[in-house]
Image: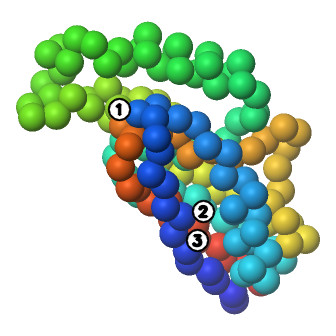
């Protein structure tokens, strides 16, 4: 069995941001030499997310609007978590968008459906955070 474990690091310039990380993950799959297996992509911080969806600007704006309705940043006093911090909403947004994805590897490539891409979702940015990529297979 072959394995590859690598971390990707992000330090966004915006508090909220969606980044398509598919090319980086595809590069790691190729580097691993795995032809048939699984690829785990996992956000290693509690205010960031990994998810799969379409790389379409309007959809990402819709996510931002929807998430802000579900877990608004203001008023920060409405959250119990915000003691010395103002990121409780970021924890909620992460919970909604998810912590990780697992994608099958078939014939040495990520086995996606139409339009699927892997995204890093940042909800409390402007600081260094990491994503784990773990690839296993034959």
Q: Which label's residue is closer to the chain start, 2 or 1?
A: 2
- Give the class, few, some or many, for how many residues have Cα within 10 Å of label 2's Cα (few <14, many ≥20): some
Q: Residues within 10 Å of mark 3 (few under 14, many from 20)?
A: many
3 or 1: tag closer to the N-terminus: 1
Q: Is residue 14 visible?
A: yes
Mark 2 or mark 1: which is in front?
1
| Mark 3 vs 2: CB contact within 8 A | yes
Badge 1 element: helix
Mark 3 or mark 2: name the one nearer the start of the chain: 2
Q: Is 3 positioned to the left or the right of 89 in the image? A: right
Residue that appears at 58% across and 59% down? 41
Can you identify the residue that label 1 sits on? 90
Q: Which residue is mark 2?
A: 40
**Which residue position is annotated with label 3?**
134
Query: From mark 3 to mark 1, how far is it between C-alphas?
Result: 25 Å
Residue ID at (85%, 65%): 109
Local crowd size for mark 1, using a 10 Å CA cut-off: few (<14), some (14–19), many (≥20): many
Mark 3 or mark 1, whichever is nearer to me = 1
- Which type of secondary structure does the marked residue at label 3 adopt? strand
**Residue closest to the eye, 13 or 34:** 13
Q: Farthest residue to the bottom: give it.
A: 1
Residue 92 lies in quadrant: top left
Relative vertical location of residue 113 with respect to residue 84 in this rendering, above or below: below
Residue 101 screen position, x and y as percent = 60, 51
Q: Decide: is 88 above or below 103.
A: above
């Amino acid at each position: 069995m072959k394995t590859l474990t690598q971390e990707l690091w992000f330090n966004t310039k915006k508090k909220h941001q969606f980044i398509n990380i598919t090319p980086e993950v595809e590069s790691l799959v190729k580097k691993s030499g795995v032809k048939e297996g699984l690829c785990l992509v996992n956000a290693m911080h509690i205010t960031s997310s990994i998810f799969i969806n379409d790389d379409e600007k309007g959809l990402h704006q819709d996510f931002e609007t929807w998430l802000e309705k579900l877990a608004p940043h203001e008023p920060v006093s409405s959250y119990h978590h915000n003691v010395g911090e103002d990121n409780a909403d970021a924890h909620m947004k992460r919970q909604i968008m998810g912590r990780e994805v697992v994608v099958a590897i078939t014939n040495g490539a990520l086995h996606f459906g139409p339009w699927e891409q892997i995204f890093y979702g940042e909800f409390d940015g402007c600081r260094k955070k990491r994503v784990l990529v773990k690839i296993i297979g034959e």
